[in-house]
Amino acid sequence: MSKNPNKRTKPARRDEPMNGAMKFFLAGCVAELYLLLIRRFYVNADSDLQRITWYDSYLWVLVGVGAAVLVAGVVCAFLWRGNPKFRIGCLVIGAGFYISAVAGLVRWNMSFMTLLMVVVPVVMLLGILWSLYDRECALSLTILGVTLIALWVCRRALSSVVVGLYVKIAAIIYLALLVILLVQVARKKLDKLLPAKADPLPVYVACGLSLAAMVIVLFSSTAAYYVMWALAIIVFGLAVSYTVKQL
């Protein structure tokens, strides 16, 4: 009989991915709630006076609070370097930067609110994805997800006289990054991102589909709608397949 029968055992390593996913989920919910509060009381204010008050004072206060939290995180990270608490300092830095950056961006231009409302859930889902799935699955789905966002941007802005050229340049840069990623994976230079034992085939397929989709859209922005739907169906099928595989 053991000396300490009531002693708690350490959680199994298989529980760590779920714990990481829950942390990303909770952080995403808090971040989205922060956006909803600013949207409710500033963007969708009940009166012009309320919006002016937020513009002149409250948003500046949030920028200051975020900056103070960021500085505190930097100090803690510096003091805790080489200590397990160092991660806490990094999290505080991220929280402070987020609070300050969101308030500053929305005060500068309210249209950033729509973009932020989409970016936060996407980042949360990617964090959950990287916590639960194998690296090759997470990387391939991340590539396809980023490509879907790029296709959406191209469809809306590629024909624009004002920003069309910049969107096209960004799309070409994204194509170059995909090619570089393919080369690095083929040469097995991404050990930290993709372990040597991982199957690179899903990454090759994701990069190939993304390259084909982006080239089609660059030549015909009207085709972006159909390419997006086709790629979305592929992403859904891969996600279901990977989920069944993980069970």
Image (spheres, grey):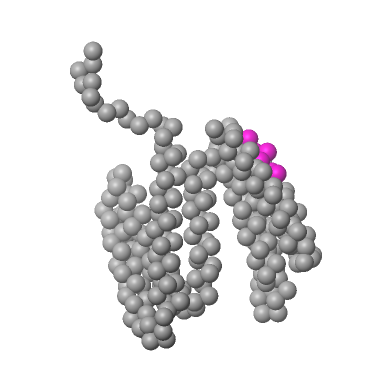
Q: Is residue 226 above or below residue 241?
A: below
Residue 231 % position (x, y):
70, 52
| Main secondary structure type of the part rendered in magenta | helix
On the picture, is 41 further left or further right than 159?
left
Query: Where does the image place residue 166, in percent across and percent down from the top left?
Result: 66, 72
Q: Residue at x 24, y 26 (%)?
A: 7
Tell me, yes or no, whether the highlighted magenta stretch contains residue 203: yes
Residue 138 is left or right of residue 42, and the answer is right
Which residue occupies the foreground of this view, 42 or 57? 42
View extreme (top): residue: 1
Q: Is residue 187 visible?
A: no
86 vs 107, left or right, is: left
Q: Is residue 235 above or below residue 60?
A: above
Question: In which quadrant is the N terminus drawn?
Answer: top left
9 over 85 or under it: above or below: above
Work out which residue is located at the far left of the displayed protein and give it: 3
